[in-house]
Amino acid sequence: MKLLIYSANFAPEPTGIGKYSGEMAAWLAAQGHEVRVVCAPPYYPAWKLGSAYGWPPYRRERWQGVEVFRAPLWVPQTPGGLKRLLHLVSFAISSLPVLLAQWRWRPQVVMVVAPALVCAPGAALLARVAGGAAWLHIQDFEVDVAFQMGLLKGQRLRRWVSGLERWLYRRFDVVSSISRKMIERLHEKQVPASAVRSLPNWVDVAHIQPLARPSAYRAELGLPDGAFVLLFSGTLGSKQGLHLIPEVARRLAAYPDIVFVVCGDGVMKPELERAAQTLPQLKLLPLQPFERLGELLGLADVHLLTQSVDAEDLVLPSKLTGMLASGRPVIATARPETEIASVVGSCGLVVPPGDAPALADAILALRAEPMRRQQLGEAARRFAEDRLAMPAVLRQLEYDLAALTGEA
């Protein structure tokens, strides 16, 4: 099978869409499929081009058996509504010639990963010209997120953009997403049921396993014996609800054993750095190597999954998969009817979004019950092994691709 993946974010970006696109491409290539990728240079989550990618702007690489074509894009230092849109449009324009040149290769499936939805028209066009199938995979509903978070405004604009979005969806043979609630939203957006597929984010349960000993990060951070660690590890973005962590740290200042560790990079990092200057119990870590991810996640006594109420069912955080695989309980901020709540409800606690007192109470409740933490952590690990293990998810993807192309 010949598969072309079109995604602005791609490995070696360490988190989010770039990580998943890279693992998917490398796994399929290892199964003997021909895989090509059209993508941007690494820039996320730091919002800064990788030092090795300044020049030339266009390049062709070989990465883990995958042919990678990189096209430039504009990276704003402070991404906002309009800037973020222009950033994505810049990649869609710069990459279009590289993308359309792939018609000579005749890909059997062209898969575009959204965001960015602005890349979808080019992917659909290439699939038709090359005689292949078009697959749109949605990691988050960027149009809905933009309006609900106020990045885009106006009912007339929303009706026009939503209509264009539905029109684009109908140009694809397959439209997939990562969670039950997001699949339901595809139906609401009038995507034919025959075109809808589930492609959940996965986790390498062999690489991330529960630690049977204290994490080495405890010594590296100079944490005292018996420290109770709340860990947030992931992209420090505006839709993560991260303002709650310093607020809760202040509320729990009377408990010196409680330590908050935030690991990652993103637009919220400067605000967290300012907060950490006055909160000794708040520790910040930069992005850590993938090789140490299991060690990092094992640092937590409890994982924190804060999320903006405006985005809680429009995205299912990719970081959740690693939290579950680490065998530690999770405290999530989400409304009861959301998919985050349905997943975390069996392996942690769920509190209302933006509710600092409730989050503080949940932390104290789990701190006081080590046996309950162990039981919830074991449930989290079982969920990851049964539902999110990488080989099972990618084997199903391979089956769906084979059915789409008519191959055995």
Image (tube, rainbow, N blue to C red):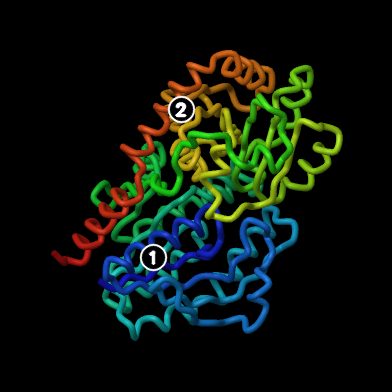
Do labels 2 and 1 touch, CB within 8 Å? no
Position of the N terminus by quadrant: bottom left
Q: Is residue 336 above or below residue 260?
A: above
Q: Which mark is residue 26?
A: 1
Mark 2 residue crowding within 10 angstroms, few (<14) / some (14–19) / many (20+): many
Q: Callout 1: helix, strand or loop?
A: helix
* Quarter occupied by residue 104: bottom left
Residue 329 in sight here: yes
The residue at the point 49 percent across, 24 percent down is: 348
Q: Secondary structure at mark 2?
A: helix
Judge by depth and name the residue closer to the eye, 128 or 283.
283
- Residue pointed to by mark 2: 377
Label 1: how many Cα within 10 Å (few below 14, some 14–19, many 20+): some
Side of 301 where 324 appears, left or right: left
Q: CA distance from mark 2 to mark 1?
A: 30 Å
Coordinates of residue 92 in the picture (x, y in percent): 54, 70
Residue type at mark 1?
Ala
